[in-house]
Amino acid sequence: MQFFRQLAPVISGAILFVGAGAVRAADWPQFLGPNRNGTTTNRIAASFPKEGPTRLWRRKVGQGFSGPVIVEGKVLLFHRVDNEALLEAFSARTGEPVWRCSTPTAYVDDFGFDEGPRAVPAVSDGRVFLFGADGHLIGVSLADGKKLWEVDTQARFGADKGFFGSACSPLVEGNLVLLNLGGGNGAGLAAFAADTGKLVWKLTDDEAGYASPVPFLREKERSVIFFTRAGLKVVDPVAGRLRFGFPWRSREHASVNAASPVVAGDEVFLTASYGTGAVLLKLKPDSAESIWSGDESLSAHYATPVKRGEFLYGFHGRQERGPAFRCIEWRTGKVRWSEDGIGAGTVALADDRLVLLLESGELIVATADPAAFKPLARAQVLGGGTRPPFALADGLLVARDKNQMIALDVRQVP
């Protein structure tokens, strides 16, 4: 069984990530970017040499499935070297070290996979929030890497390590850090104070799964959508109140819900592998109703699709069996096209262009076109095992494989 990376809440462009504080719009401050939807308005070059875009720097890195973030001219990476979980800051343009924050870790993977952190850091109002594979939630100063506070969620809340360790990428809402925690005694979901780490509220007994929460705005009423192992949970983050739920989970015990929800207006798309398939829901004030569902449209194993217009683009099928990359209609689930044999990977949307980084280390830029899969450029930029999500900001694409992290100049040529 492979590690299911939670990759990627996808939200309509109108729903902004309010927790990003003073972070620049050009930054990539958290899991799947500034709006927590896998998209950026920054343009990416439509062509580059056969060897790929210009590589500005390369650094050796430790273990981990956690992808980088780009904030205020720094690249931040959460990884493991020996028995230390390290958050390191580098110059985005040169790769030179700026500071580091170290925490001891003793996480052991039960399946013998990578033992580094899984969750992507979140940056808000001068703080960086980390969630380690061992369940340690940590607040760090963005300015100098000083550790501000730490909570051992496994020890305090009985949070289960699951199949592959804790992996929820934190979501910041105001002064709250939200986690799909999977703790016992009503700590399935939890909110912590961003400035102190103090528990603010906890809800449900749901196991965590591997999806990360996303914000949802309707008529000035903010909610947070969690996709737990049991299904959808819609939560009032201020009151710490469960609004309602919708059951949707993988059919096998040895499975998880790993791809995060895709939100557009008052509709949400859920997808899971292992015979579960996808469902498009219409969200009401106290319930959700199915618009369509099925296992033949877009059954994502771990990588969350991106939405452009009335279409979804994403990976369909089990990671280890060689998924297809396809486009489906949002309103109906109808498959518009499917590119077989491409393999597993992650996807983001740069304006009107799809950016795919495959597990093989191949980078593909393609037009987001519902008529056909139309690659514009492709190159081998990393080695095998390229599973962590990448960051795309300010003309840079920063990504890592098992051994190295690179920064590529992908600016649109005037």
Image (spheres, rainbow, N blue to C red):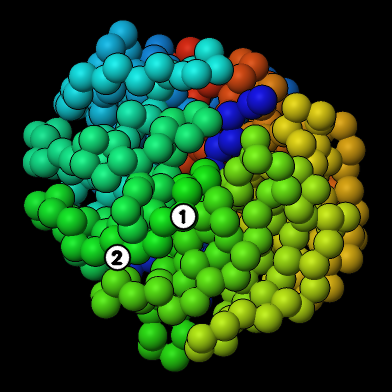
Q: Residue furthest front?
A: 185
Q: Position of residue 194 (x, y in %)?
A: 17, 55
Q: Vertical placement of 170 versus 56: above or below?
A: below
299 is higher (above) or lower (below) than 109:
below
Q: Is residue 394 left or right of residue 40?
A: left
Residue located 76% across and 36% down the image? 318
Q: Nearer the viewer, residue 390 or 134?
A: 134
From the top left corner, tell me how far across and down residue 310 is, in percent. 74, 72
Q: At label 2, which amino acid type do we have?
A: Glu
**Quadrant position of residue 152:** top left
Name the residue carrying label 1. 206
Which residue is more in the foreground, 51 or 260?
260
Residue name at image x 57 percent, y 56 percent: 230
Q: Horizontal placement of 77 versus 48: left or right?
A: left
Q: Amino acid at mark 1?
A: Asp
Is residue 236 something one can see in this rendering? yes
Mark 2 closeness class: few <14, some 14–19, many ≥20 residues within 10 Å: many
Q: What secondary structure is marked by label 2?
A: strand
**Does the CB distance between marks 1 and 2 fall below 8 Å?**
no
Residue ranking furthest to the top: 82
Image location of residue 298, percent across then percent down: 79, 54
Q: Is residue 317 above or below residue 219?
A: above
Query: What is the CA distance from the residue labelled 1 to the residue labelled 2?
Result: 21 Å
Can residue 352 be seen in the rendering of this structure? no
220 with respect to 72 (left or right): right
Compared with 6, 282 (above or below) is below
Query: Residue at 73% of width from left, 77% of height from top?
Result: 290
Q: Secondary structure at mark 1?
A: loop
Mark number for residue 173? 2
> Could you say which disc has been placed on residue 181 in the image?
none
